[in-house]
Amino acid sequence: MRDGICGSDLHAYNIGGDEIGIFKGAAIGHEFVGEVVEVGSKVEKINVGDHVFINPSVAKSKPGMLAMAGGLSQFDLIQNAKLNFNVFELDKDLSWDRAAVIEPYSVGIHGKNLIDPKPTKNYVVLGAGPVGLGAASGLREQGCKNVVIVDVAKNRLSFAKDELHIDTLNPNEVDLAKELEKRFGTAPGLLGDPRLNIDAFIDCVGLPQYMNDFIDKAKMDSKFVVVALGASEVSFKPQFLAMNELSLVGSAIYNADDILEAINNVENPSNNFPEIVSVHYPIEKVTDAFERANNDKNVIKVIIDVND
């Protein structure tokens, strides 16, 4: 079994997880894949030996167990197991390393699917962590070429450019609004003012300034998809949303179609998104793994090898 460390896991590890649904004593871990070792008498179409991805949001019968699905347990019980609902079969030729990124990939794919992407439109992804890279990769896999990803971490921007072939911008080095205008041009707002010709922004970082910039600068009918769990308050006047028919869209986890899309993408050997896996730790060194994920800004995704 393999389990990836998520930002929500780190939140619980560092300061407690009550506000994000990870409670003291819980069996955490929700980015996991593994092998079926036992099947209940009423389970259909799932067999011992199958390699599977688990949808953590419905892995347990009790609601609200998404972040406590048990991915860091050596054995995990999936309740009411059903194929393509909470259990998704994987090709046995797919390496565990590639399979281990399906969960964050699904989160990013769900965010981009909420905007109904079209190849001819212009998109900006804010944040080049695993989810942001997943959203950008999903757009490219869907044929969208006019995609820019924004971050300040140079190693993550290099990954986006070199491995995913996505254009990048670092707001610490350039005037972001001016650079986006150079790339995408402008379109008139309701009052004739020039606004950025960008059809949607996918926020995977959660900085309040980005939402305010969107309201101030985005063209009519543009969308801002909130994927990141930003904790800071955002203040704006609703009239500016109305005047340019802007949309704020919340994005929560994923559905079966998003998961199947992510699986299809990682099973494509030409897709380099799974290369986000930076380092492995055995379950016996789980504390070291969390400390590495906390402190080493050069890693993108830390994986724990729960069972080999």
Image (cartoon, helix red, strand yellow):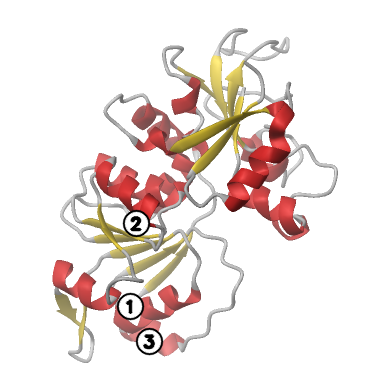
The image position of residue 172, as x and y in percent, is 36, 71
Judged left or right of residue 61, residue 85 is left
Which residue matches tag 1?
A: 245
Rendered view: 177 above or below 158: below
Which residue matches tag 2?
A: 115
Q: Type of residue at label 3? A: Phe
Asked whether residue 219 appears in the rendered view, the answer is no
Mark 1 near mark 3, Cβ–Cβ under 8 Å? Answer: no
Q: Residues within 10 Å of mark 2 (few under 14, many from 20)?
A: some
Rendered view: 108 above or below 29: below
Judged left or right of residue 248, residue 286 is right
Asked whether residue 102 appears in the rendered view, the answer is yes
Q: Residue sitting at 17 percent across and 90 percent down?
A: 192
The local secondary structure at tag 1 comes to loop
**Labelled disc at residue 240:** 3
The local secondary structure at tag 2 comes to loop
Rendered view: 151 above or below 32: below
